[in-house]
Image (spheres, rainbow, N blue to C red):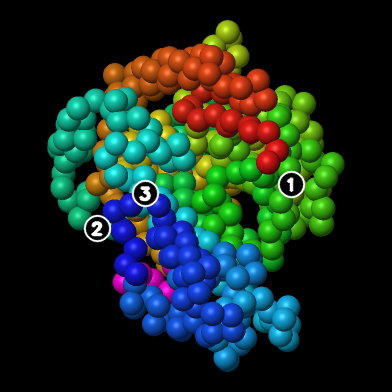
Amino acid sequence: MKPDKQSNIPLYIQIRDHLKASIASGKYTNGEKLPPVVNLAALMNVTAATVRRALQDLTEEGLIYSHVGRGTFVGSAKTTESATPLHTNREIHTSLHNSYVDLVSLSQRPGVIAFTRGIGDPETIEKGILTRLAARALESGEELFWDHGDPRGLLCLRKEIAKLYEEQAIEIHPDQILVTSGSQQAIALLAQQAAESGTQIICETPCYSGVTNALKAFNTDTHTIHRGPFGPNPHEFLGDPSKTMLYLCPILHNPTGTNIGDKERIEISTWAKKNGATILSDEVFRDLHFNENGQKAPLSFLADPGPDQAIILGSLSKSFISGLRVGWIVSSKERINTLINIKKTMDLGCPPLMQGIAREFLADPDGYRLHRDKTRIYYKNLRDITLLALSTYMPKEITWTKPEGGFQLQVQLPEG
């Protein structure tokens, strides 16, 4: 059997259904040993992880069972000795992750609409803008971009990022900013630091999967807490708060698109100040807040409890271009200095030319801010069209969030 790699059906499902049909037809009889995973993978021209994922489903259905060191057999283990689990937890997680990657690859095909990608609409990007910005950046001298540069990021870019926070009446020094390769690297840096310092992470759920993936990669001490309609409840936090970092996305939350409530924000800030905890606030969507009906984005945790107890993530990936890979961390100078030492082991410094392009866009009076205003209007129109379609076509049992900005919302189906 050769799975059809052009099919929209994931490979592991094709393999699972083929083996299931072979068992049902008697091709494989009860008690018969299946070929080793490596052999099946070679015969089918797929990865071993894909075969294991198919076998996992068959095991859960009771159609096959496994003995460590002996192999995998057709039938139920209940009729023999107790079966040994086919995989360890890490193997199962890896198998599921690989299957997810297979599904994601399908979304790249022309004509497929992917509802899970956190990438801005290309229609919001001016044609030829990168060519124009790159030329302007190079006018300052190519020599600026020959070296890997300051691991903190170009000073001229950090000054422009600081001006964004001045618009929120928050005074930030460039030395409190660390430029990263998107907010994903920022999360990985903080996960590594937490793992090395023994800091426990409390992560609101649901949340951006890139956060949990980074925390798993560094084996951090991670706990989850439910996010309600207006944010997590600080009274549910466990453990020693003084050794705790709370991750949350308070502004246009990923994936619901909702904001944290004023009451919840104040309670969380008070909790952090009282216990000496740290707040990791993912604010990458702030600049896409619609500010409709006079409702502005919630106050940043950078204002309260302040940079000593707050770490803010920012990025141009959502509000401009994901491929630019320019993000940043804002916190205290002391924390930034410790993160620089970790970052230097990763990449020495983010690509200077990309930073130069970002700097030119932020510094241009008719650049980023004008783009930001136009993009807000664009997404607000799409949001309104989407909400109208949902209210028109969805059954009454289905609910959804009403985002106040950005480009995502969450649909809730009935249980089951």
- Say if 237 sits above or below 363 in the image: below
Q: Of residues 312 and 128, which is closer to you in this image?
A: 128
Single out the mark in the foreground, 2 or 3: 3
- Which label's residue is closer to the chain start, 2 or 3? 3
For disc 2, the neighbor class at 10 Å (few under 14, some 14 to 19, many from 20) is few
- Which label's residue is closer to the chain start, 2 or 1? 2
Examine the rendering and report whether any part of residue 307 can be seen. Answer: no
Q: Give yes or no for residue 49 being in the magenta stretch.
A: yes
Q: Position of residue 203 (x, y in %)?
A: 67, 49
Q: CA distance from mark 1 to mark 3?
A: 35 Å
Residue tagged 2: 147
Identify the residue at image location x=50%, y=30%. 408
Identify the residue at image location x=46%, y=28%. 407
> Label 3 near label 2: C-beta < 8 Å?
no
Examine the rendering and report whether any part of residue 313 can be seen. Answer: yes
User: Quarter holding the C terminus?
Assistant: top right
In the image, which disc is placed on residue 8?
3
- Say if 99 sits above or below 268 in the image: below
In the image, which disc is placed on residue 386?
none
For disc 3, the neighbor class at 10 Å (few under 14, some 14 to 19, many from 20) is few
Count numbered badges in the picture. Answer: 3
Q: Which residues are magenta?
A: 45-50
Under mark 3, the amino acid is Asn
Q: CA distance from mark 2 to mark 1?
A: 43 Å
- Which label's residue is closer to the chain start, 1 or 3? 3
Residue tagged 1: 225
Q: Position of residue 403 (x, y in %)?
A: 56, 23
Q: Of residues 335 and 240, which is closer to you in this image?
A: 240
